[in-house]
Image (cartoon, grey):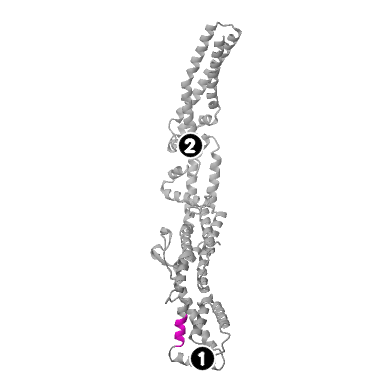
């Protein structure tokens, strides 16, 4: 009887294993939902969506196999229960009991191939469930939308790209989304503001500062435009966002409901993408964003490194037209050259003999260098700047008598400051640079060519950034 007890326990475990394997499948809603799918109606649609054609066969086999296994299992469990009672009451000989145990075990083992086949087809249906639930997504519906509007496939792709560009949630500073554009523009603005024009005279710093402010304003305008577009997206963007939320809700429903709605969802999705493509064409400045970022990056590199270094070199180089010492010496020599210079020399000498402060070439050169290296402006047609220059020069010349030689020296210094400022401005704005290729997005790419100047670069930044002005 001890052997029969062991055999009973083993048989009970075998039957329990079968039930554990089949009952979860019988209760699984993901399998039962396939019973409501009309394969005859949606066969072509399912094939277009890439679903295997034998799903209907799998569904029928799963349903029939589960019913068969559960029915056979219930019968074997009843036989096992009756036999266990007989063995416990010793109402059956040991040999007969052992024979019945073996018979029940053999019949239970015959269910193993059925279980293997059942599990295989269940895997097919569960994989198809996952596949179908991927269909009501922006990516999953795209093939269906293209089939519904075959003549507008490029426009659909353009509309989807615009939607992803406008809504992708990322702060990665790459120009592949509005978030990335904003992050990159903010970083370039920070970098431009952080530039220090060290070891340069105030006049050069003022000119460079004006150019830097062009870049700062361009970056700030781009940031404001992107922020406004993100906060107040076009109605076409909001419509597709609502559509995507509806798709999220649909994916939670049964497979049959999802499949039933796929055709009309594809048509609606295609129409939404067409609307988005039209909106994308209307917002042409969006195509300009990467190019504008490239120009800002180039401006930062020039102002942070190359141009200040070149200016420092020219401002200190011998015989350089930008060297204040050289220009001051040149202008002082010209001041005292010729008949006019001889007359001024004698007149200034008499001024000195009379006890008043006079000036010679050395003193004039010193005054000129002081003006060139301390004044932040050179005039340049700007009346407020000319007024400030006159006031500053008047302070430098307060020791000299009026009207002579004060008026003469003031005119000389103003002239020299203007010459030096003009040369600095031409050197800065005419600084030659080689632009990186920005692709066909640049409206004047052919006209610009590969080489340009800092003046053209700043003009582009000002012109392009105006397109991003938030109204």
Q: Is residue 297 above or below residue 336?
A: above
**Within 10 angstroms of label 2, few (less than 14), some, or many (20 or more) residues?**
some
Which numbered disc covers residue 348?
A: 1
The N terminus lies in quadrant: top right
Looking at the image, is mark 1 or mark 2 earlier in the sequence?
A: 2
Badge 1 marks a residue whose secondary structure is helix
Q: Is residue 375 above or below residue 342?
A: above
- Does the magenta segment cover residue 333? yes
- Pick the front one: 386 or 56: 386
Which numbered disc covers residue 116?
A: none
Magenta region, mostly helix, strand or loop? helix
- Does the magenta segment cover residue 454? no
Q: What range is drawn magenta here?
A: 328-336
Q: Is residue 422 above or below residue 184?
A: below
Q: Residue at x 53, y 7 (%)?
A: 96
Left or right: where 159 falls relative to 449: right
The C terminus lies in quadrant: bottom right
- Pick the front one: 66 or 451: 451
Which numbered disc covers residue 131?
A: 2
Residue 296: percent from the left, percent from the top?
Answer: 48, 62
**Within 10 angstroms of label 1, few (less than 14), some, or many (20 or more) residues?**
some
- Pick the front one: 74 or 330: 330
Residue 211: percent from the left, percent from the top?
Answer: 50, 68
């Amino acid at each position: 009887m001890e052997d029969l007890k062991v055999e009973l326990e083993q048989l009970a475990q075998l039957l329990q294993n079968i039930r554990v394997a089949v009952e979860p499948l019988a209760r699984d809603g993901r399998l039962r939902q396939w019973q409501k799918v009309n394969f005859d109606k949606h066969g072509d649609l399912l094939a277009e969506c890439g679903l295997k054609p034998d799903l209907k066969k799998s569904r029928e086999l799963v349903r029939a196999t589960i019913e068969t296994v559960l029915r056979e299992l219930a019968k074997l469990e009843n036989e096992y229960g009756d036999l266990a009672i007989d063995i416990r009451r010793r109402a059956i000989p040991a040999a007969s009991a052992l024979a019945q145990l073996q018979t029940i075990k053999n019949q239970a083992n015959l269910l193993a191939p059925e279980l293997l086949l059942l599990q295989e087809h269940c895997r097919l249906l569960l994989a198809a469930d996952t596949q179908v639930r991927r269909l009501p997504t922006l990516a999953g519906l795209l093939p269906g939308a293209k089939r519904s509007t075959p003549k507008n496939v490029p426009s659909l792709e353009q509309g989807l790209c615009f939607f992803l560009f406008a809504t992708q949630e990322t702060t990665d500073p790459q120009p592949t989304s509005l978030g990335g554009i904003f992050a990159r523009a903010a970083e370039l603005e920070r970098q431009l503001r952080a530039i220090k024009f060290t070891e340069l005279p105030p006049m050069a710093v003022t000119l460079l500062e004006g150019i830097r402010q062009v870049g700062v304003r361009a970056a700030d305008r781009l940031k404001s435009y992107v922020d406004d577009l993100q906060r107040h997206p076009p109605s076409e963007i909001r419509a597709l966002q609502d559509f995507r939320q509806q798709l999220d809700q649909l994916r939670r429903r049964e497979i049959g409901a999802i499949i039933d709605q796929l055709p009309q969802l594809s048509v609606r999705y295609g129409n939404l993408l067409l609307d988005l493509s039209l909106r994308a064409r209307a917002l042409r400045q969006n195509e300009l964003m990467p190019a504008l970022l490239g120009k800002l990056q180039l401006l930062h590199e020039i102002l942070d490194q190359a141009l200040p270094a070149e200016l420092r070199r020219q401002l200190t180089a011998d015989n350089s037209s930008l060297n204040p010492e050289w220009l001051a010496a040149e202008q002082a020599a010209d001041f005292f050259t010729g008949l006019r210079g001889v007359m001024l020399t004698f007149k200034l000498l008499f001024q000195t003999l009379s006890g008043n402060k006079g000036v010679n070439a050395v003193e004039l050169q010193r005054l000129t260098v002081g003006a060139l290296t301390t004044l932040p402006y050179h005039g340049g047609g700007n009346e407020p700047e000319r007024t400030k220059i006159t006031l500053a020069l008047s302070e430098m010349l307060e020791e000299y008598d009026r009207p002579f030689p004060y008026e003469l020296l003031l005119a000389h210094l103003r002239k020299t400051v203007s010459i030096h400022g003009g040369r600095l401005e031409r050197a800065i704005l005419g600084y030659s640079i080689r632009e990186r290729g920005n692709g066909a997005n640049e409206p004047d790419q052919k006209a610009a060519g590969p080489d340009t100047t800092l003046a053209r670069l700043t003009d582009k930044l000002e012109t392009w950034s105006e397109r991003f002005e938030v109204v």
